[in-house]
Amino acid sequence: MVVRRSGYLFGRGESLAAEGRVRKKTWLGVDLMVKVKNAANKSSGSDSGRSNSSACVRKSLQQLEQITADDALWDTDASGAVRKLWAAQNQLRAEQAGAVDVRPQRSVDDVAKFKTWLSEKHGADLEAMGVELALLSTSIESSSGRPLEAGTPQIEVRALRAFGGDQLVMNIPESSFLSLDVVKNDRELASLYQNPMLSSMPSMMLSLVLLRERLRGDSSPFAPYIAMFPKEFSIPMFFEPDELDALEPSHVQELAVRRARNHARQYCQLRALLASRAVQSIPARAFTFEAFSWAVGVVMTRQNMVPSRVHDNAVLPALVPAWDMMNHCSGPGSTSFDEDSRSVIFHSIRSLRVGDPITMFYGPRSNASLLMYSGFVHAGNAHDFVPLSLQISDADPLKRVKNMVLRKLPPFCSDGWSRESSPTSSPNGSRVGGGASSTRSSKSVKRHSGSVADDEYVARLVSTNLCERLLLFARVACMDKDAVGSALREPARCAASKVPNAIELAYILEICSSFKSRYPSEEELNKRAELSHHHALIADLIRSELAIIDATVVAANEAAASRSSQESSPRSSQKST
C-alpha cells in the first residue's frame, strides 16, 4: 500500500461450533434460521440419521486431512494428489448437501435494496454521485464471444453523468465497510481471533466474519451488501483437476495447486476449531466446505487493506461497498483513504460519458496475480512478467565458482538470487539449468519442488526489454576458466555491458527455445478454450506468457545487433583513416 497525503492508495483484491442444533435465532435471522433447521431435518430425519450423517462427515474430513498431510504424494504426483483432493471434497459436499446454501442469488431487487441501504444507513447516495449499478444477464458474452462467469449475473458500474479525468466519483464512508473492526466489540469473534492461525491470517478471519454475517440473514447490518456478492468465482482455487493440469507449464499451476491444498487443510483446521469452541454464530452444520469456499472466494477477490479505526496503527483487510464492484482497466491509481472523513475516495481515471463503465486500476499486477486473486487475464498488461528460474548445470566443472560470481553481481547479490524477489510468482517459476558452452547439452527445463536452492536465480522476463538477470546469467554460464577468474576479481566490470555478445545471445535463445517448447501450440490452446470459461482464461494466460518469451527473443536479437553495429563502427573508421 502506498501512503499519500490523503491516506492510502488502493488496488482491489490481493494479499483468506459443536455438532447440533442452533440455539440462538438472532444469529441467523428468520429466513436462514428456518432454512438451516429444515436442512438439518431433511438430512438427518431422526437421531439415528443425524448420527450416521455426522459419522460420514467425520470420515470425509479425516480423508481430506490425510490427503492434505501426505507430503510424499504432493511432491511426487501433484496431479494425482489434486484428483484425490477433488474426489474427497466432492464426497464431503455430498455429505453436507442438506445444509443451507449461503451463496447469494443477486437480483434486480437486491441491487435496489443495496443502493437504499448505502444511502439511508451510511449517507452514500450513488445516484447523487452520478453512479449506476447495472445487473448484466448471464447470457452476456465477452468481446471474444465467450461467456462471462457462468451462473453469476455481473455487476457493471456505470456513469449517470459525464465525468472529467481525475474527477471525484465515489465517497464511501467507513461505517459501511465490512472489516475486522467488528471483532473489537464482539466477545465471541474476539475470542476466535486470538487463535494463532487466525491472528496471523487476518484475511481468513475476515472470511469467517463474512460467513457469520451471512448466516445472520436479514438481522445482519450488512445483509443488503452481502446479497450483492457473486455466487461463483473464476479464480484457480475453484478450478477442476483437468483445468489445473491445463495451467502447465505456467508457474501459476504450482501456485494454484498449493492454494487448493492449503484451502482444504485450513477448512479442516477451522472446522475443528469452531467445534471445539462451540461458536454459536457459526454452527458446525452451517460451516460447510461450500460455505467456507464461498466466503474465502469473496475475500480473496475483493479485500483491501484499510486503516483500522479501533486497532491502533493497524491496517487490516476490509470489504468496501460499491467501490469493490468496479472492474479493472489500465490507468493511474486513483483511490485513497481520507483520514479526516474516514472514507474511501475514488477519482475517475479518464473522462467518462453518460453510460460509460466506471473502471479503476487494480495496481501494477501481473496476469498471474490477476488470475489467482481476481479471476481474469488482462490482454496487453504492461505489468505482466514471466518468472524463469535458472541454475548452472551440475555437469559444469566451474559451477561452484560461477555461483560465486553470480552472487557478486548487483542484480543477484542482494535478493536477486532468491525466489522471494519475484512477488506474485515468488514460490515458482520454470527452472532451466545450463552451463558453459561445453556443457550446454545438460540444460533442461525442470519442475519446482517448492523450495529455494542457494544456486537458483530468478529472472523476470518482460515484454519491453531484455531481462538483465537473464543476460548476466547467460554471460557467466558461458565463461571459460580465465573469464570466470577475471569476473570474480572484478564483478562490476562483468556487469557493465547491457547487451549480449554472439555466444551469450545463442545461449539466451537456447534457454527461451527450451522454455517455450513446454507450452502447447496455438491450435491446442484454441481447442482448450472451447471446453469451459476456466479453460478460456488459462489459454489467455498461456498466450500472454508466450508473447513475453517471444518478446525476450526479439529484445535479445535487437541488443546483439546493436552491439555488433557498435563494434564494427570503430574498425570501419580506422580502415578509412
Image (cartoon, rainbow, N blue to C red):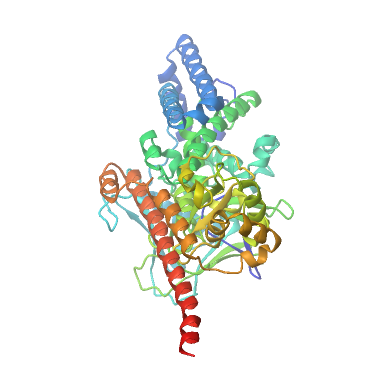
Decide which of 121, 363 is in the foreground and name it.
363
Extreme right residue here? 312
State the image coordinates of residue 215 (x, y, percent, origin top left): 51, 36
State the image coordinates of residue 411 (x, y, percent, origin top left): 62, 60
Apparent side of residue 240 relative to residue 207 in the rendered image (left or right): left
Q: Is residue 278 above or below residue 199?
A: above
**Screen quadrant of the N terminus:** bottom right
Q: Is residue 64 above or below residue 135?
A: above
Extreme bottom residue here? 577
Q: Is residue 531 above or below residue 53?
A: below
Q: Taking the image as drawn, is residue 386 in sight?
A: yes
State the image coordinates of residue 239 (x, y, percent, origin top left): 40, 39
Q: Taking the image as drawn, is residue 223 in sight?
A: no
Which residue is located at x 56 percent, y 27 percent?
Answer: 71
Figure disc tally: 0
Apparent side of residue 6 relative to residue 379 in the rendered image (left or right): right
State the image coordinates of residue 332 (x, y, percent, origin top left): 50, 69
Which of the 4 image quadrants contains residue 280? top right
Which residue is located at x 45 percent, y 12 percent?
Answer: 49
Which residue is located at x 37 percent, y 41 percent?
Answer: 246
Q: Is residue 102 above or below residue 409?
A: above
Apparent side of residue 198 relative to residue 283 in the rendered image (left or right): right
Which of the 4 image quadrants contains residue 493? bottom right
Decide which of 549, 87 is in the foreground and name it.
549
Decide which of 482, 295 is in the foreground and name it.
482
